[in-house]
Amino acid sequence: MKTELIQKAYEIAKERYAAIGIDTDAVLEKLQNVSLSLHCWQADDVVGFEPKAGALSGGIQATGNYPGRARNIEELRQDVLKAASLIPGKHRLNLHEIYGDFGDKFVDRDEVEPCHFQSWIDWAKANDMKLDFNSSSFSHPKSGDLSLSNPNPEIRNFWIEHTKRCRAVAEAMGVAQNDPCIMNVWVHDGSKDLTVNRMYYRELLKDSLDQIFATEYKNMKDCIESKVFGIGLESYTVGSNDFYIGYGASRGKIVTLDTGHFHPTESIADKISSLLLYTPEVMLHVSRPVRWDSDHVTIINDETLELCKEITRCNALDKVHIGLDYFDASINRIGAYVIGSRATQKCMLQALLEPIATLREYELSGKGFERLALLEECKSLPWTAVWDMFCLKNDVPVGEEFIADVQKYEVEVTSKR
């Protein structure tokens, strides 16, 4: 797309938004500072790099077998950098523990150390990318249906030690990058059928978390993530949303809201303001649920748009961390990265362009008609011209131009794997 055409369209949009009190130049500066945490597992279908990697388990599933999956650390890093080159702004990389640089040596999960991620730390520094981290309680001989809530002390202690060590890894990452590493804890624990020991398993999970978080760190932030159910674990989830809200509020921990981990009729956006009153920050995992599957590629839809609007309406850009969490193996994986990331950014842009001061004035004055009318008219304002300018300023493809880049990368790189 020609630069002069983009600039001309932007100037028109700038004037149009100025008419409702919005400075688009200031909005672009704010959007520039919104970093997404790109999820490494989109590139390889949540396989990881353990020498004895097993089949994916723990209530999650990647569907599809599109050619070109990253098979090793080098290929995954190459794919992430390619995706990042097509996404405007500066972003982070979110690693699961199973993506450590273990070489040919088997390192069980209760033995992992920061040294197993030193090459990731060095790579991230060389590419000016910050790291986030996750413990990995799935796809392991000891994962079963219960990990941190397992009544068997041997198994439970194994996962407690694993998670403790993951926090130490996250601390090392935070120190190296001089910026806190966001460390997320999600366990799949639950039951396929009727459960009569709900309280018991939750008592065990609470105790496990207390042990895990006993050590204080200054360069990482702890997040705890709930889920409604997992595949094969449909009847009961130990770490429910209610459990983690209570734990987070009582322990000062960040609660992670995954947009695919709730009932389809629930509004995740509505949870932001409530959580921020009682927890220090909020972590988001953005995906697109479709029926039972929570991990479709994020697109511009009402749910994601309302989520971003609520963040800005709460003035919480500095308190809400945004990560992506989907793994679609049925389409080009790099393309999936780019679609989901840019869609999330587009939703955030529309949120930042909202004339919130005027809307609040209408609301506080009881002017419901005026408020609804302005909200509706904002939907047809030329936000796409502002988005094109954002891409131009960041030297990434504008509009659909990135499709050709992904296709070229597939021909030259991923199709040869």
Image: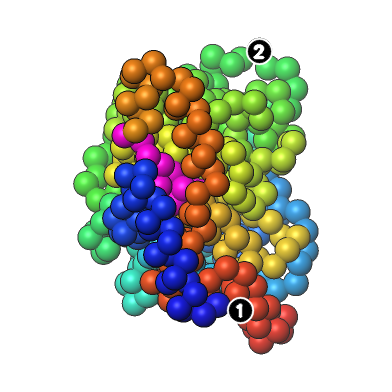
- What residue is rendered at 65% in x and 83% in y? 408
State which tag comes first along the sequence, 2 or 1.
2
- Amino acid type at circle 2 is Val
Q: Which residue is mark 1?
A: 405
In the displayed structure image, the side of residue 161 where residue 343 appears, left or right: right
Regarding residue 417, the answer to whether it shows in the image is no
- Amino acid type at circle 1 is Asp
| Residue span colored magenta | 347-357
Asked which secondary structure carries label 2, the reply is loop
Q: Quadrant of the C terminus?
A: bottom right
- What residue is rendered at 41% in x and 19% in y? 367
Image coordinates for residue 308, horizontal then vertical, percent: 46, 42
Dominant SS of magenta comes to helix
Task: Please tell me which residue lies in front, 366 or 354.
Answer: 366
Q: CA distance from mark 2 to mark 1?
A: 54 Å
Q: Residue furthest bottom?
A: 412
- What residue is rendered at 62% in x and 51% in y? 299
Image coordinates for residue 150, horizontal then vertical, percent: 56, 30
Q: Quadrant of residue 312?
A: top left
* Residue 144 lies in the magenta stretch: no
Q: Quadrant of the N terminus?
A: bottom right
- What numbered label is drawn on residue 417? none
- Give the answer, above or below, for where 344 lies relative to 72: above
* Residue 348 lies in the magenta stretch: yes
- What numbered label is drawn on residue 196? 2
Image coordinates for residue 89, horizontal then vertical, percent: 40, 65
Asked which secondary structure carries label 1, the reply is helix
Task: Please tell me which residue lies in front, 123 or 151.
Answer: 123
